[in-house]
Image (cartoon, rainbow, N blue to C red):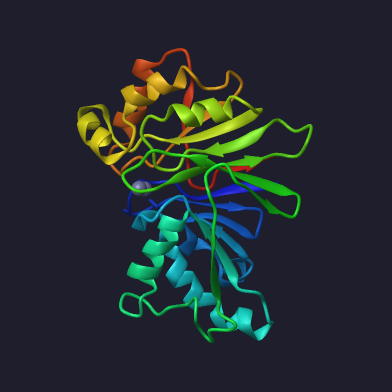
Amino acid sequence: MKIQVLGCSGSIARDSRTTSFLLDEDVLIDAGTGVGDLSLDALERIDHILLTHSHLDHVLGVPLLADSILRRRQARGAAPIQIHALPETLAVLRDHVFNNHLWPDFTRLPTADDPVLRFVPFEIGQVLEFGERRVEVLSARHSVPACGFAVHGPAGGRGAWVFSGDTGPNPDFWERIGQFPVAHIVIETAFSEPECRLARTSGHHCPSSLAQELTRAPADARIYITHIKPGEISAVMAGLRALDQQRPVMELLRGDTFDL
Ligand SMILES: [Zn+2]
Ligand SMILES: [Zn+2]
């Protein structure tokens, strides 16, 4: 089981791609601009897309990917790509993206009976199974309904890979991930310390709010910081290191891979 970081930036600029991870070859976790670096062959192999929430930096790859791979998947009779998300997230996609104004409704194309995309709602706490791989939906606290994910590793492995999604402080997240072995935590810190107010009102972390939360992090887990705005990386990482000397934190980088 392997997870590849396709994008982990809070926004775009040269060499910055927004949130997207590839689990093995067929499961995409969020569909930010990092998806656009995959080859057409690799895009075609994606059978499932898991979305943390409806914000554009996490979903914009879905409509474009559908268009790119439609012909190839139809030609080989592949099943629709399943888009797994909270019901509120799927409603936003339906009403505001696949509404035949912003983009064609690929949940009814090329035909309503055999579309290229299918929406599959999930709820917090649900465990999705893809073959032997188990992905648990974790709670998040953001400005819109949102979630994180725990990819549970194989039995006897080093533990789960946990992704917070976009979130501010959230006791429920730490309580849940304290109940199973965790090897890696990918958690957001979207804003630098001078912007803590903005972080609070928009449902994100800044260094001091994250440092407070990390006191609850499982002792053995490695901490990776994601979703930093371009241009703010050194400020955020310096802020985190100044506040929490005990807990080493690393900047997550595009191209990083995790083996579970
Ligand atoms: Zn967001
Ligand atoms: Zn975001």
As displayed, is residue 120 above or below residue 180? below
Q: Quadrant of residue 256?
A: top right
Residue 18 in the image, given as x and y percentages of width and height = 40, 52
Q: Is residue 182 above or below residue 65?
A: above
User: Which residue is painted at 66% across and 27% down in the image?
Assistant: 181
**Residue 42 percent location from the top left of the image:** 61, 66
Q: Is residue 152 visible?
A: yes
Residue 32 visible in the current orientation: no
Q: Nearer the viewer, residue 226 or 145?
A: 145
Residue 211 spot, x, y in % from top left: 39, 21
At horizontal 62% and vertical 26% (from top left) the residue drawn is: 179
User: In this rendering, is residue 242 above or below 27?
Assistant: above
Image quadrant in which you'd find residue 236: top left
Q: Nearer the viewer, residue 48 or 230?
A: 48
Q: Total number of numbered labels? A: 0
Question: Percent from the top left, x then y, of residue 10?
Answer: 35, 46
Q: On the rendered structure, is 154 left or right of 213?
A: right
Left or right position of 208 against 109: left
Residue at image position (31%, 30%) is 206
Tell me the quarter of the image containing the C terminus. Answer: top right
Q: Compared to 13, does 93 lie above or below?
A: below
Residue at the right extreme? 156
| Furthest residue toward top | 246
